[in-house]
Image (spheres, rainbow, N blue to C red):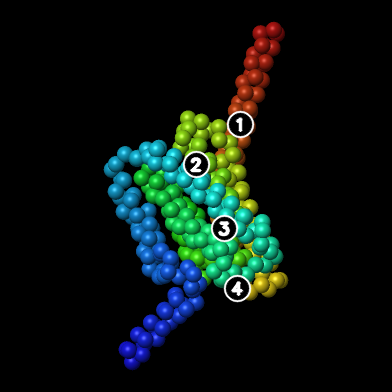
Amino acid sequence: MSNIYNNSMVRFYHHVFYDLSDPRTRDWFLIPSPVPGTSILIGYLYFILSWGPKHMQHRKPYQLKNILVCYNFLQVLLSFWLFYEGLDAAWLRKYSWKCQSVDYSNSPEALRIARGVYIYFLAKLSELLDTVFFVLRKKENQITFLHLYHHTVMPMVSWGATKYYPGGHGTFIGVINSFVHIIMYTYYLLAALLPQYQKYLWWKKYITTLQMGQFCLAFLHSCQLLFYDCDYPKWSLILILPNAVFFYFLFSDFYNNAYKSKEKHSKLLQDKETKIAKTVSNGSIQDERRKVD
C-alpha cells in the first residue's frame, strides 16, 4: 500500500510539474520545481516578519543611499526593457487585443516572448529587496499587508506563467505592470538621489492611482476571455479576476489612508486656523470700537 501511494504521488508530481509544463522553459533556472522559489519566499517572509526586525532592534538604521540609487536605477532599466519587449515582440505587432493564445513553437519570436516572461519572473524576485531595505532602514511602517501580499503573490504567479503559459493573453498584465514600475522606480530613484528635494516630488500619490488603473485594465482585458476563444485557458480567470479586484481595493484603501486622511486633516487644521484668525480679527475690531466710543 505504501509503495502504491508513493508511486501515485510521484506520478502526480511528475505529471503536474513536468508533463503539463512548457518543454521550452521547464529546465530554466528556478523553474523545474516549485521548491526553490517557495524556499525563497519562506526565507523572505521569515526575514521580514521575524529575524530582520529582531536583528535591527538595537541597531541604528542603515542609510544605504548608494545601494538604493543603484538598485532603483537598475529596476528602471529592467522595467523599461520588459515594457519595450512586451510591446515590440507582441502587443504592437502580432498579438490580438481580444484574445491571444500561447505560441509554444521554437520560433525566434515565440522564444523571445517566453524569455521576456521568464525575465519578468526574475524581476519579481529581485523586487523582494524592496522590503528587505525597509527592514534594514527601520521603515517598518511601510511594510503593510498590501506590500507583503503583492510581493509574495507576484513571484508565484509569474513562476506559473513561465512554466506553463510563457506568452499569450496573460502577458498584457506584465506589460502594463512594467510601465507602472518605470514610473514608480523613477520616483524612488529621485527620492534616494535627492532626498532634500523629496517634498517637491508631488506626483507620488498619482503612482497609487496608476497602480489602481492597471488592475482595472487587467480586469477588463482578462474578461474578454469570457467572450472570445483562442485556446488560452479560461480557468486562469479564477485566479486573475479575484486578484485584480482584491488588489484594486487594497490599493484604494492604501490611497485613502495615506492621502485622503492627510488632506482631510490638513483641511481641518486650515479651517481651525481661519476660525481663530477671524475670532482674533473680530476681537481687535471690537476693541478699536470701544476706544473710539
Tell me the kind of residue under disc 4: Pro
Query: Where does residue 284 sit, x and y in percent of width and height?
Result: 64, 16
Kindly indicate the quadrant of the structure image that contains residue 39.
Answer: bottom left
- Near mark 4 (Cα within 10 A), the count class, few <14, some 14-19 or many ≥20, is some
Which tag, 4 or 1, sits closer to the chain's start?
A: 4
Instruction: Please name which of the two marks, 2 or 3, marks the residue nearer to the observer.
Output: 3
The answer to the question of whether label 2 and label 1 lie on touching residues, with beta carbons closer than 8 A, is no
What whole-number distance in Å separates the C-alpha atoms at marks 2 and 1? 30 Å
Which tag, 2 or 1, sits closer to the chain's start?
A: 2
- Near mark 1 (Cα within 10 A), the count class, few <14, some 14-19 or many ≥20, is few
Which tag, 2 or 4, sits closer to the chain's start?
A: 2
The answer to the question of whether label 2 and label 4 lie on touching residues, with beta carbons closer than 8 A, is no
Tell me if residue 142 comes above or below residue 8 in the rendering: above
Q: Name the disc covering residue 188, or none.
A: 2
Tell me the kind of residue under disc 3: Gly
- Near mark 3 (Cα within 10 A), the count class, few <14, some 14-19 or many ≥20, is many
What whole-number distance in Å separates the C-alpha atoms at marks 4 and 1? 54 Å
Residue at 70 percent of width and 71 percent of height? 228
Q: Name the disc covering residue 174, or none.
A: 3
Residue for badge 1: 270
Q: Which element type, helix, strand or loop, lies under badge 4?
A: loop
Tell me the kind of residue under disc 1: Gln
Residue sitting nearer the eye, 275 or 286 = 275
Residue at 65 percent of width and 19 percent of height? 281
Q: Which element type, helix, strand or loop, lies under badge 1?
A: helix
Residue for badge 4: 233
Query: Where does residue 254 sit, x and y in percent of width and height?
Result: 55, 50
- Quarter of the image with the C terminus is top right
Tell me if residue 6 comes above or below residue 62 in the rendering: below
